[in-house]
C-alpha cells in the first residue's frame, strides 16, 4: 500500500518543529507501525537524509517505551494495543497518517517523535514503592492471605506500563490515570499499607509539580490506555488522598 | 490538611461540591417554578416566603451566590491551567474517538449558562432587589405569578431561556455524574448514580423549558 505520512520533525528540544510530508510505497498490512517507520527511515538514510527518531524497545507491547500520537489518538486507532502492536492492516492504501509526539508540558520533546517522560519516573520515585525486608529473612508474599478480588484489582492496576497514552489522550494532559494505577496497585494490598498515607500525598504532590493538568473525568484516558486501566483507580486515588489528608 | 488546600485534587473537590450544591438548588428552584403552572396560589405564597424569609434572604441567598461564583471562577481557572498543561497543541486531535463532546466542552456550556445567569438576574433578581430594598415597596404576596408570566411574553426571551436550558442539560449530563467520581464514588452504586444523574440532567431542564413555553403561550392578561 502507498501512504502519505505527515510527521513532526524537530531537531532538538530547543528548536522549533514542523510537520513534514513523506510518501511511502510498499507498505505491507502485516508490518507493525514501527516496522513501517523502519522502512521509511531506511529510505531516508539511503537518500542521505536524517532518519525520523522515535522511541521503541521491546516491540512486544509490554515495556511502555513506544508512544506516538497517530491520527489524533495515542497508539493509533486500535484499542488495547501499543504502537508497536498496531499493524498497518488497520490503514488503507492511499491513507494520510498524521504522526506526532505525545503532547504535554510535562513531556517535552527531545527530538522528532521522542519525548522525555521522566516526569512519570519522578512521580513513581515519590511514593511508588513498599517496605520489604530483603536481607535474608524475606517473607514469602504468598504467605500473606489476600482477598482474591483485591488481588485481581491490584494486578489490573499493576499492568500499567507507564507509556503516557493517558496524558496524551487527555484534553487537559492530566496524569491522574497513571498516578492512580501506581497508587492503587499498593493501596489494595496489605504490603502497601505501611507507606499508604505518605505515598498518595507525595505522588499527587509530585504530579502537580510536574505541571500535568487536572482530571475532568472525560474518560479519554481509560479508552486509549493500551492496558485498559480503569477509571475506578482514579476514584480510589481520590478516596486515598482525601482520607490521608484528613489523617494529617 | 494544608497539602489538601494546595493540591489539584482540592480544586476538583471544590468544583464537585459547589456543582452538587448548585444541582440541589436547581431541583428546589424547579419544584417552586412548576407550581406556577399547576398551583398558582402555591407559587405566589412560596415565592413570597423565599423573598422575605430572613434565613433565605440573608443566609441561603449569599451562600448560593458564593457557590455560583466559586464554581465559575474555579472552572475558568482550571481550564486555563489545563490548557497550559498541554503546551504545544496537536495538529490532529481526535477527541471524539474517546470522549463525549459535552465532557470536553464544559467550558462552552458553562459560559452559556453564565451568560444566561446574567440575563436571568437582569430579568428577576435585580428587579426584585430594587422592588424590596431600593424602592422599598410594600409586601404583595400576589404579584409573583403575574411578574413571572409577563417575562415570557416575548418570544426572543423564551427562546434564549430554552437555549440556555438545553446547554444546562448538556452541562449536567457530564457534570452531575462526574462530581461523584471526583468524590471517589466509583463502586456498585455507580451505574445507578449514572442513570439517576442522566435522568435528572434531562428531566429538570426539560421541565424548565415546559414552564417557559407554558407561560409564553398562556399570557396572563388581567
Image (cartoon, coloured by chain):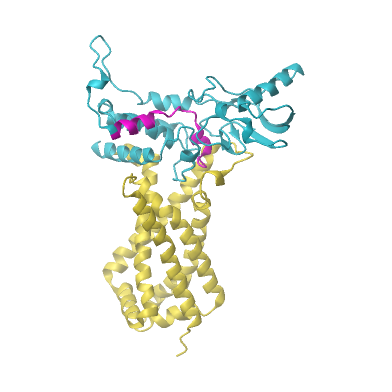
Chain colours: A cyan, B yellow
The picture places residue B162, in percent across and down from the top left corner, at 51, 69
Q: Relative to residue A168, is residue B156 depicted above or below? A: below
Q: Is residue B61 magenta?
A: no
Image quadrant assignment for residue B90: top right
Residue most extreme to the top: A136
Q: Where the N terminus of chain A falls, by quadrant?
A: top right
Residue at image location 51% in from the left, 46% down from the top: B99
Apparent side of residue A204 relative to residue A131 in the rendered image (left or right):
right
Image quadrant assignment for residue A13: top right
Residue at image location 38% in from the left, 61% down from the top: B65
Q: Is residue A170 magenta?
A: yes
Q: Which residues are magenta?
A: A149-172
Give the main secondary structure, helix, strand or loop, of the magenta stretch: helix
The picture places residue B87, in percent across and down from the top left corner, at 56, 36
Q: Relative to residue A136, is residue B181 depicted above or below? A: below
The picture places residue B24, in percent across and down from the top left corner, at 34, 61
Apparent side of residue A31 relative to residue A131 in the rendered image (left or right):
right
* Viewer-side residue, A102 vs B128: A102
Amino acid at each position: 500500500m502507498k501512504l502519505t505520512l505527515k510527521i513532526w520533525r524537530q531537531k532538538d528540544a530547543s528548536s522549533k518543529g514542523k510537520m513534514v510530508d513523506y510518501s511511502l510505497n510498499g507498505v505491507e498490512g502485516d508490518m507493525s507501525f514501527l516496522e513501517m517507520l523502519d522502512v521509511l527511515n531506511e529510505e531516508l538514510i539511503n537518500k542521505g537524509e536524517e532518519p525520523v527518531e522515535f522511541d521503541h524497545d521491546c516491540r512486544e507491547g509490554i515495556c511502555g517505551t513506544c508512544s506516538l500520537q497517530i491520527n489524533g489518538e495515542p497508539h493509533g486507532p486500535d484499542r488495547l494495543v501499543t504502537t508497536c502492536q498496531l499493524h498497518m492492516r488497520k490503514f488503507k492504501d492511499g491513507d494520510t497518517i498524521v504522526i506526532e509526539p505525545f503532547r504535554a508540558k510535562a513531556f517535552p520533546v527531545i527530538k522528532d517523535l521522542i519525548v522525555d517522560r521522566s516526569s512519570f519516573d519522578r512521580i513513581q520515585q515519590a511514593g511508588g514503592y513498599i517496605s520489604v525486608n530483603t536481607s535474608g529473612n524475606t517473607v514469602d508474599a504468598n504467605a500473606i492471605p489476600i482477598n482474591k478480588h483485591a488481588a485481581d484489582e491490584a494486578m489490573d492496576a499493576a499492568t500499567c506500563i507507564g507509556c503516557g497514552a493517558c496524558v496524551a489522550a487527555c484534553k487537559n494532559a492530566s496524569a491522574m490515570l497513571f498516578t492512580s494505577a501506581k497508587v492503587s496497585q499498593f493501596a489494595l494490598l496489605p504490603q502497601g499499607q505501611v507507606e499508604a498515607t505518605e505515598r498518595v500525598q507525595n505522588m499527587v504532590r509530585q504530579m502537580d509539580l510536574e505541571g500535568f493538568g487536572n482530571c475532568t473525568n472525560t474518560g479519554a484516558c481509560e479508552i486509549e490506555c493500551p492496558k485498559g486501566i480503569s477509571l475506578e483507580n482514579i476514584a480510589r486515588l481520590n478516596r486515598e488522598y482525601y482520607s490521608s489528608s484528613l489523617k494529617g | 490538611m494544608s497539602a489538601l488546600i494546595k493540591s489539584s485534587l482540592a480544586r476538583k473537590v471544590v468544583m464537585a461540591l459547589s456543582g452538587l450544591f448548585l444541582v440541589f438548588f436547581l431541583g428546589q428552584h424547579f419544584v417552586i417554578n412548576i407550581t406556577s403552572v399547576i398551583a398558582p396560589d402555591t407559587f405566589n405564597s412560596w415565592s413570597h416566603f423565599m423573598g422575605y424569609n430572613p434565613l433565605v434572604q440573608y443566609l441561603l441567598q449569599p451562600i448560593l451566590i458564593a457557590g455560583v461564583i466559586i464554581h465559575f471562577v474555579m472552572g475558568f481557572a482550571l481550564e486555563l491551567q489545563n490548557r497550559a498543561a498541554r503546551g504545544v497543541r496537536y495538529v490532529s486531535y481526535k477527541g471524539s474517538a474517546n470522549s463525549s463532546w459535552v465532557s470536553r466542552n464544559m467550558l462552552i456550556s458553562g459560559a452559556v449558562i453564565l451568560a444566561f445567569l446574567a440575563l436571568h438576574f437582569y430579568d428577576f433578581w435585580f428587579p426584585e432587589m430594587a422592588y424590596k430594598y431600593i424602592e422599598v415597596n410594600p409586601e404583595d404576596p400576589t404579584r409573583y405569578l403575574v411578574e413571572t408570566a409577563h417575562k415570557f411574553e416575548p418570544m426572543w426571551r423564551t427562546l434564549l431561556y430554552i437555549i440556555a436550558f438545553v446547554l444546562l442539560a448538556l452541562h449536567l449530563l457530564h457534570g452531575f455524574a462526574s462530581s461523584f467520581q471526583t468524590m471517589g464514588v466509583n463502586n456498585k452504586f455507580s451505574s445507578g448514580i449514572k442513570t439517576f444523574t442522566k435522568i435528572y440532567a434531562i428531566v429538570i431542564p426539560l421541565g424548565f423549558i415546559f414552564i417557559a413555553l407554558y407561560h409564553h403561550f398562556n399570557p396572563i392578561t388581567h
